[in-house]
């Protein structure tokens, strides 16, 4: 039996979820698609395993920029070492190709497919219910702040440009 652990990266922090009964990806995809609209139904398939809030917007910004460059943020490695079971039958689910490549370099078994995408879509839809410690307003504000900070950090200025 394979247990899928989807990684969800938000402006508030890192969350690792656990998908129950993940044997047949095709059947699982249909189950997730049917259950994503209702938290009660979705929560029977997916549960929050661990959440690590970022210490502040600076850490969230550095995390996002590192991923954009293709680097593995140390906070992600530490988080996964502490919370992701290793060995056969445990698979990390990611939606970002850069994270997938980085995790493969770290010898962490990963998958990134349509089923993982649907699970993460459901997590995103019910994030405020899963993460009771972060209010919806605070999550919205953090997302907006992070978007502005990353944009400001990644914009390259050309002094010769007029």
Image: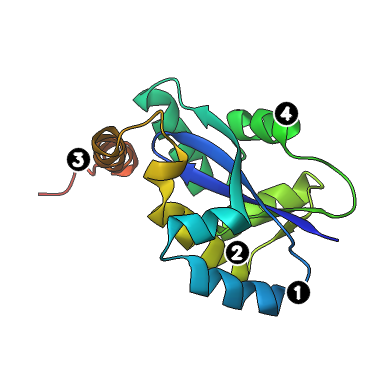
Q: Nearer the viewer, mark 3 or mark 2?
A: 2
Q: Which residue is mark 2?
A: 116
In the image, which is nearer the foreground, mark 2 or mark 1?
A: 1
Earlier residue among tags 2 and 4? 4
Give the foreground label among 3 and 4: 4
**What residue is rendered at 31% in x and 37% in y?**
139
In the picture shown, does residue 120 fall above or below 153? below
The label on residue 82 is: 4
Residue labelled with disc 3: 159
Quadrant (top left, top right, bottom left, bottom right) of the N terminus:
bottom right
Q: Residue at x 45, y 55 (%)?
A: 39
As rendered, which of 45 and 143 lies closer to the eye? 45
Q: Which mark identifies residue 63?
A: none
Gap between marks 4 and 1, in whole Å?
Answer: 27 Å
Label 2 CA crowd tier, 10 Å (few <14, some 14–19, many 20+): many
Q: Position of residue 34 (x, y in %)?
A: 50, 74
For numbered disc 4, what is the local secondary structure? helix
Residue 79 sits in quarter: top right
Pick whichever of labels 3 and 4 is earlier in the sequence: 4
Q: CA distance from mark 3 to mark 4?
A: 45 Å
Q: Is residue 150 left or right of residue 96?
A: left
């Amino acid at each position: 039996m394979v247990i899928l652990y989807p990684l969800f990266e938000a402006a508030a922090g890192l969350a690792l979820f656990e998908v129950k009964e993940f044997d047949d990806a095709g059947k699982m995809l249909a189950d997730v698609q049917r259950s994503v609209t209702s938290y009660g139904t979705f929560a029977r398939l997916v549960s929050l395993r661990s959440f690590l809030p970022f210490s502040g917007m600076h850490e969230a910004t550095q995390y996002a920029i590192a991923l954009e460059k293709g680097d593995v943020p140390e906070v992600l490695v530490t988080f996964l070492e502490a919370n992701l079971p290793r060995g056969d039958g445990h698979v990390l689910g990611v939606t970002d190709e850069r994270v997938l490549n980085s995790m493969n370099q770290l010898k962490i078994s990963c998958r990134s497919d349509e089923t993982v995408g649907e699970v993460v879509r459901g997590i995103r839809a019910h994030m405020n219910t899963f993460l009771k410690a972060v209010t919806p307003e605070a999550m919205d504000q953090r997302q907006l702040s992070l978007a502005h900070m990353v944009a400001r950090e990644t914009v390259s200025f050309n002094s010769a440009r007029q």
